[in-house]
Image: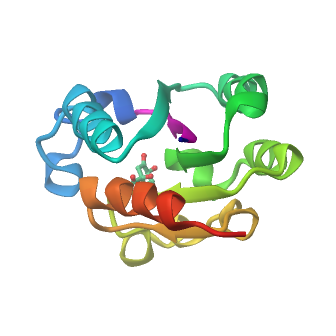
Amino acid sequence: MRRILLIHGPNLHLLGVREKEIYGDMTLKELNGIIKKYAFKNKIKVKIYQSNCEGEIIDIITKNMKDTDFIIINPAAYTHYSYAIRDAIKAVNLPTVEVHLSDITKRESFRKKSVIKDVCVKRFYGEGVKSYIKALDYCLKWKK
Ligand code: DQA
């Protein structure tokens, strides 16, 4: 059974309220419900966290590293500038998938840059909840 650590970064607790024209109506609880259902159906063990704090995200990554096969992370705004999260991903040396709900390549120019991209094995973006489902599928099929 694949053990996945899934992390949602800052402001994603506001899904369903925040910029609905970009992120849609779905709340984080609903999104997590879909992820959990899909994981259960596919015999994936998934642990889900959300944090608004950079250091806390690093602690979540490092505290869970021994019980994790893959990380799926939507670092939200930290994507664009957190070298600390990048270093944590590199340090634990676990295959990591970067995920975004929106298409960060087609928004403001500061969102085009991801400082974690090259420490991740794959990224999915621009497809809402489907970005997460594709990431789960990717982990299921992943071979070293
Ligand atoms: C996001 C995109 C980021 O640029 C933004 O800061 C977010 C959400 C996304 O899922 O589309 O908070 O990661």
Q: Nearer the viewer, residue 73 or 76?
A: 73
In the rendered view of the protein, which quadrant contains the C terminus? Answer: bottom right
Q: Is residue 97 visible?
A: yes
Q: Is 32 situated above or below 122?
A: above
- Mark yes or no: residue 101 visible: no
Q: Which residue corresponds to the image point at 53% horizontal and 72% vertical from the top-left? A: 112
> Can you name the residue that lies furthest to the right here?
91
Magenta span contains residue 9 = yes
- The answer to whether 95 is drawn above or below residue 127 in the figure is above
Name the colour scheme.
rainbow
Residue 123 position (above or below residue 66) = below
Viewer-proximal residue, 120 or 69? 69
Q: Position of residue 84 (x, y in %)?
A: 80, 42
Picture layout, residue 69 above or below residue 109: above
Span highlighted in magenta in the image: 2-11
Which residue is located at x 74 percent, y 43 percent? 85
Along the viewing direction, whichever of 91 and 13 lies nearer the viewer: 91
Q: Is residue 87 left or right of residue 37?
A: right
Residue 21 picture location, percent across and down: 14, 55
**Image side of residue 82 versus residue 79, left or right:** right
Q: Quadrant of residue 22?
A: bottom left
Instruction: Reply yes or no: does residue 42 show up in magenta.
Output: no
Residue at the (54%, 48%) spot, across then down: 72
| Residue drawn 76% across the image and 33% down it | 65
